Amino acid sequence: MTVIDRRLFVFGLCGMGLTWTSVGRINSACAATKISPDERSVLIVVDVQNCFLPGGSLAVKDGEQVVPIVNRIARAFANVVMTQDWHTPGHISFASTHPGRKPFETINLAYGDQVLWPDHCVQGTSSADISKDISISHAQLIVRKGYNKDMDSYSALQSPGVGRDRPRGPAADRADCPPNDTPSTRSGPR
Ligand SMILES: [Zn+2]
């Protein structure tokens, strides 16, 4: 059985998402304990897409550094799922869809507050492609999210409002992004 450092596991687990926060914060939050992936373990690689890498329209600074780490960790997992932000042209989360609005402004929509982003990860474009440097040929599943033109979705596991007592804003839906996190404190993919 392969044993890997939990710190690296979490880094890979969150994929690009972890670059929203500082690596220092991650390291302090994660004890250097060991984990042992087994046949029931699943690695989820989140949104390692061109649009979120340097040169992309919503790039994460130094985001490319996560790629070799993810590749390395993935070798320890029999089960790997990847996610892909997958927006329609004119998606409701794009600032360009709302005349007079600018990226990173927040507006209120029927389902809650929505931060407006630069156009990114449009379906079928190279921007939406998973990085060519990701090498996980044994990944079994790609989960696409954000494909509903009228609703943003950050979670790969749940759409906003589904299974809840009331609709919630997407920012509140993502487990890795606290609702009170603001664009000014972020540096990563949405
Ligand atoms: Zn998005």
Image (tube, rainbow, N blue to C red):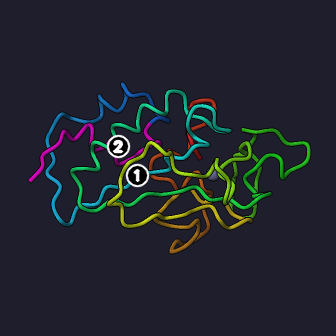
Could you say which disc has been placed on residue 83 in the image? none
Image check: 179 left or right of 105? Answer: left
**What amino acid type is highlighted by mark number 2?**
Val
Are there few (<14), some (14-19), or many (20+) residues within 10 Å of tag 2? many
Q: Where residue 87 sits: x, y (%)?
A: 67, 59
> How many neighbours does mark 1 have within 10 angstroms: few (below 14), some (14-19), or many (20 or more)?
many
Measured from the top left, where is residue 103 in percent x and y?
A: 76, 39
- Asked whether 96 or 28 is in front, the reply is 96
Is 3 one of the magenta-colored residues? yes
> What residue would you read off at disc 1?
45
- Residue drawn at x 17%, y 42% is 4
Which structural element holds mark 1? Answer: strand
Marks 2/1: CA–CA distance: 7 Å
Read off the magenta span: 1-18
- In the displayed structure, does residue 42 sit left or right of residue 56? left
Q: Is residue 91 above or below residue 167?
A: above
Q: Which residue is tagged 2?
A: 70
Quarter occupied by residue 105:
top right
Q: Examine the rendered structure and indicate whether residue 34 appears above or below residue 166.
A: above
Residue at the spot x=54%, y=47% of the render? 49
Q: Are marks 2 and 1 in contact (CB under 8 Å)?
A: yes
Pick the front one: 182 or 12: 12
Q: Where is residue 99 shown, x and y percent of the image? A: 91, 48
Apparent side of residue 179 relative to residue 11 in the rendered image (left or right): right
Q: What residue is drawn where x is 36% and y is 25%? A: 24
Verify whether residue 188 appears in magenta: no
